[in-house]
Image (cartoon, grey):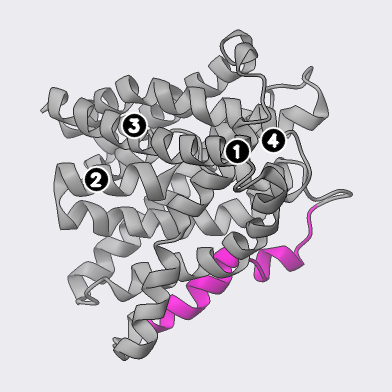
């Protein structure tokens, strides 16, 4: 099982790198440049992201048992992020402010959609994907509020308006009522929603690739801060969560699904937010790329610990 999980994780990381490479070479040949990708960031933010969330609700059966389990998974998703908050406070205080927020965000926010969801599907089947969808919902709410704040995008304090109006909460406010009411959208509406949702990973990775094209990759392996990000994101947070599972006797399938999400590498949004808010995209790109590579080993280990 460990070898199978290792291969599945490695495959997902390899796919990610292929998509990044397409963006990288597209920029080098002038087909899709960093300037063009920045114009697409708003499309990804305000249209594609809400559709990802809405689409996840549309694909879930709203039976009472599923609703209960979905709620538990969502609470555990909240726990993942709440645990990360105090951990990152003392970190990177001596680091340049233009980079410190990127490192802190990368420590807390994981690639739930592209890495965790398919891995949970492969390891646990539909039930695992179901639990991960709850965590993706929670991730988007935290990411577009607390995440934007800590990355350094909101100057002069926390903007409570963004707590209520952001891509994460917009998606939930549309999708959750449809889920609770058992509404089945007609094909003419459901299909465009799904079509927009599936743009999320390829578009994010193409944008990521254009940023990598303008980054000095030679410094990636010499940045000590990236290794600290990896320790917090890939080891500390998932181990704390797994200890909690054992303490509170969380069912194995649910614990394993949450562990997959908790141990996922840095979110693609680390790079997207950096581009959106004119932060250091080079630092963000290097951090996501290297931590994702390390996750090939760490994710299967965490899954094995949660499943035993």
Which mark is first along the chain, 1 or 3?
A: 3
Q: Position of residue 22 (x, y in %)?
A: 47, 40
Please report whichever mark, 2 or 3, sits nearer to the chain's N-terminal start: 3
Q: Main secondary structure of the magenta part?
A: helix
Q: Residue at x 62, y 47 (%)?
A: 272
Q: Any mark on residue 66, and which?
A: none
Instruction: Give residue 281's mark.
Output: 4
Which image quadrant for residue 63? bottom left
Q: Residue at x 66, y 45 (%)?
A: 33
Instruction: Name the residue nearer the viewer: 159 or 249.
Output: 159
Q: Is residue 110 left or right of residue 186?
A: right
Please name the residue that numbered disc 2 is placed on.
Answer: 120
Q: State the separation of the CA atoms marked 2 and 3.
A: 17 Å
Q: Nearer the viewer, mark 4 or mark 2?
A: 4
Q: Which residues are magenta?
A: 158-178
Q: Position of residue 67 (x, y in %)?
A: 27, 70
Which residue matches tag 1?
29
Compare marks 4 and 1 and give the one earlier in the sequence. 1
Q: Circle 1 sits in a helix, a strand or a loop, which is it?
A: loop
Which structural element holds mark 4?
Answer: helix
- Frontmost of labels 2 and 1 is 1
Q: Are marks 3 and 4 in contact (CB under 8 Å)?
A: no
Q: Residue at x 48, y 29 (%)?
A: 233
Q: Would residue 24 be visible to someone looking at this image?
A: yes
Whether residue 305 is situated above or below residue 28 in the rendered picture: above
The quadrant of the image that shows the N terminus is top left
């Amino acid at each position: 099982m460990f070898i199978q999980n290792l291969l599945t994780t490695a495959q997902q990381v390899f796919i990610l790198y292929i998509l990044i490479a397409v963006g990288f070479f597209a920029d080098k040949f002038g087909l899709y440049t960093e300037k063009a990708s920045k114009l697409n960031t708003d499309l990804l933010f305000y249209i594609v992201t809400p559709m990802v969330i809405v689409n996840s609700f549309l694909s879930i059966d709203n039976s009472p048992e599923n609703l209960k389990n979905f709620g538990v998974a969502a609470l555990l998703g909240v726990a993942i992020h709440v645990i990360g908050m105090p951990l990152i406070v003392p970190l990177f205080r001596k680091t340049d402010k233009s980079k410190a927020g990127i490192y802190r965000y990368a420590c807390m926010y994981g690639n739930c959609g592209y890495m965790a969801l398919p891995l949970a599907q492969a390891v646990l089947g539909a039930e695992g994907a179901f639990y991960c969808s709850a965590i993706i919902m929670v991730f988007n709410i935290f990411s577009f509020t607390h995440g934007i704040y800590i990355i350094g995008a909101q100057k002069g304090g926390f903007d409570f308006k963004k707590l209520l109006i952001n891509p994460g909460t917009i998606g939930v406010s549309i999708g959750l009522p449809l889920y609770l009411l058992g509404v089945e959208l007609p094909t003419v509406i459901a299909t465009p929603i799904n079509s927009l949702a599936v743009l999320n990973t390829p578009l994010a990775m193409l944008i990521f690739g254009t940023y990598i094209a303008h980054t000095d990759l030679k410094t990636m392996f010499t940045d000590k801060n990236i290794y600290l990000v990896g320790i917090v994101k890939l080891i500390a947070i998932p181990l704390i969560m797994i200890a909690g599972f054992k303490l509170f006797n969380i069912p194995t399938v649910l614990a394993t699904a949450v562990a997959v999400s908790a141990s996922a590498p840095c979110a693609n949004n680390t790079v997207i937010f950096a581009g959106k808010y004119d932060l250091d995209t080079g630092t963000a790109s290097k951090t996501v790329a290297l931590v994702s590579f390390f996750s090939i080993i760490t994710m299967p280990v965490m899954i094995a610990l949660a499943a035993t």
